[in-house]
Amino acid sequence: MKKLLYVKASPRQEKSVSLKLADEFLSAYQQKYPDAKIDEIDLWEANLPEFDGDSAAAKVSFFGEPAMNEKQKTVYDELVGIFNRFNAADDYLFATPLWNFGTPYKLKQYVDLLTMPGTLFGWDPKVGYIGLLKNKRATIVSTAAIYMPGLSKAYGVDHSTPHLTDWFNFAGIDDVQNVWFYGSKMRGENETAEAFEKAKNEARAAALR
């Protein structure tokens, strides 16, 4: 049975365009895999722990820093629990708007909590980082009101797609597909509708790939 982890990075609920596109993905995915289990995380309601000094200490202990104290071990156990839920999935669906040229801070927080040595990645001084996740796929659904490829930096820059794609690759996931709906405030009504239909088709195709 397939398991999909759906991560919602937009706080706008029913007004969110990225979540609407993600719904198109989910509909097609569930048609292809009727018995699939969908695990949904709304990052704005998940009450994620802060990535603080104890979290950092738990991470760097892997690289030869002093051993964790009891508090840090407790924090590490919590981080492992968050990772285990993530790792249980076969496929990932991230729905995110472009905020200030990057990802919303809640999504960055989630990525930082997951990125722990010994779970998400390994390390070898001779070869560098080693992604530990295998046989998984990821789809990133992104939206931007102003940004569009080909425009000058006066209209924004996309640091979100490279960051998330590289992060999945870093974790060992090479099958990463990006679905974008750009420039909803930069087009005429008809052009916007056509672009949205195209993005919906791409979201469904990503689910069926």
Image (spheres, rainbow, N blue to C red):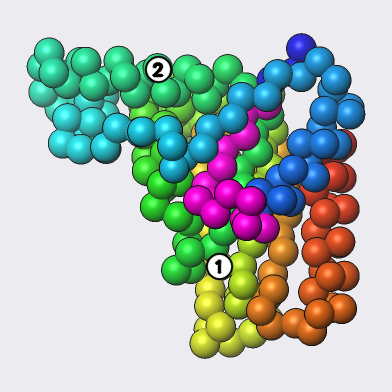
Instruction: Reply yes or no: does residue 15 show up in magenta.
Output: yes
- Image height check: is 94 above or below 125? below
- What span is colored magenta in the figure? 4-17
Determine the residue positioned at 71% across, 45% down.
22
- Helix or strand or loop: what does disc 1 sit on? loop
The amino acid marked with disc number 1 is Asp
Residue picked out by circle 2: 81
Name the quadrant containing residue 8. top right
- Taking the image as shown, residue 94 lies to the left or right of residue 47, namely right
Determine the residue positioned at 23% across, 31% down.
55
Residue 130 x %, y %: 48, 31
Instruction: Reply yes or no: does residue 150 show up in magenta.
Output: no
> Is any atom of residue 111 visible in this view?
no
Quadrant of image for the C terminus = top right
Residue picked out by circle 1: 158
- Taking the image as shown, residue 79 lies to the left or right of residue 46, namely left
Residue 149 x %, y %: 67, 76
Front disc: 2 or 1: 2
Determine the residue positioned at 87% across, 78% down.
190
Label 2 to label 1, Cα distance in Å? 31 Å
> Is any atom of residue 84 visible in this view?
yes
Kindly give the residue lying farthest to the front in the view shown. Answer: 14
Depth check, front residue: 191 or 78: 191
Q: Residues within 10 Å of mark 1 (few under 14, many from 20)?
A: some
